[in-house]
Image (cartoon, rainbow, N blue to C red):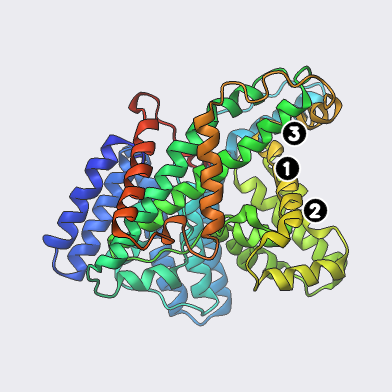
Amino acid sequence: MLFNSFAFALFLPIVFAVYWWACRSLRSRNGLVLLASWFFYAWWDWRFLGLLILSTAGDYFLGLAISRTEHSIRRKWLLGASIGLNLGLLGFFKYFDFFIAGLADVIAAFGMQPHLPVLHVVLPVGISFYTFQTLSYAIDIYRRQLEPTRDFVAFAAFVSFFPQLVAGPIERAANLLPQFLQPRALQLDRAKDGLRQMLWGFFKKIAVADALAPLVDGIFSGDTATTPGITLFFGAFFFAFQIYCDFSGYSDIAIGCARLFGFSLSRNFNYPYFSRNLGEFWRRWHISLSTWFRDYLYIPLGGNRGGRTRTFGNRLVTFGVSGFWHGANWSFAGWGIAHGLLHSGGIRKSRITINDRTRTEVPGLRDLPAIMTTFLIVTLTWVLFRSSSLSEGGQFLWSMAANALQSPGAVLLHLGRAELILLIAMIAAEWRARTQEHALAVLPQSAIARWLLYLIIGLITLSQFDLRTQHAFIYFQF
């Protein structure tokens, strides 16, 4: 079920009303959340609901088994079973055809006829997110950082919580699971703020990201070899904002929706395009995934404890794997490795100085040169992410430079003034609210002005909404 759909517009208020006014006990509310979440997921394709239940049940029982034994070898085998279950599901549905096709190419290169099965496996929505969520639960229990729950309903509701089920944030059990084990009361102030954050998320997704999508698709699907370089640059520029508004818009809707039910989800975006270096960018972009790979891959590999060469290698592996997590395409791995190389480059002393300062200081106007430089680097690397192959991405970047002096022609193509104004307004609003969790957390003092602002944003969003051409969220494909 899409957030930006008529079905969700009916689903949410019904679940909200039953949750607060019909369900009185903690267990009945958790049960309702679980059933509503399974219904939400099955709306897309009920056949894949079994995978979600399998991953949930597997790690529930494995978590209990790991906590009950003190035998180190047995604990490792049980953890291995959890890793095998989750990565096995993810690997089969996401990467099986990719690696089979790659193996077939290798066999053909030796002059033999490959006869390998290509299954054309359908990728279940959200599998990359909920498998990582359950896997981290088992790992934390193995590390003795978390006690397992014996309440299956609460655990299953934690795994399949519908606001963040299909595109995150990837929640740690230590944060979200205890909230399912404690009584919850409707807090009007938190609910109102949740609605404000949802409104801002819908605005970013529908009024900005979906408006930019046709322009971006037109540029990336064209003949890049003959397209003026400035047009290609604008294609990358607008894709940077399309993917940001699309994905952070989803996160805003998810976090705001969770607040309606008394839950606090982890922040997933912290105005990443205001970053002053790549290190800061990755502390602000898709935070739940970045910290997941930091805690469960980078640090176990050795982190920065083994000298500069070892640290460089660990960072490159982590960025490469995190890139490949996004999809079965070498362009994603290339995008991740490019960020790993760029993040590790530069002068060590200056990088440490900047990183220490950017951890505590809010970006200001004096930081604009660093912000613009970082955004330019991020924008150029997005070309690899958006391209269907490494060669296509390389051609796009080469043509951007080689055709830089060509006449730009209709640079903005069919992008109207209204869409450009909305993009600028979005950037300005987030710059103004860069110390807050979302842009609508900073509001006029006057109640009339506030409600007028809500009305304007709502009307603009509704005016851009078209049921006939609903745009799925980009990260649904990952």
- In percent of width and height, residue 168 lies at 46, 53
The label on residue 381 is 1
Q: Amino acid at mark 1?
A: Thr
Callout 2, which amino acid? Leu
- Residue at (38, 37) in percent of width and height: 460
| Contact, mark 1 vs mark 2 (Cβ under 8 Å) | yes
Residue 342 badge: 2
Is residue 250 at least partly visible in the picture?
Answer: yes
Q: Secondary structure at mark 2?
A: helix
> In the figure, residue 457 lies in which quadrant?
top left
For badge 3, the amino acid type reads Leu
What residue is shown with label 3? 390
Local SS, label 3:
helix
Q: Tag 2 or tag 3, which sits nearer the N-term?
A: 2
Q: Quadrant of residue 190?
A: bottom left
Looking at the image, residue 60 lies above or below residue 75: above
Residue 11 lies, in percent from the top left, at: 23, 44
Q: Is residue 120 visible?
A: no
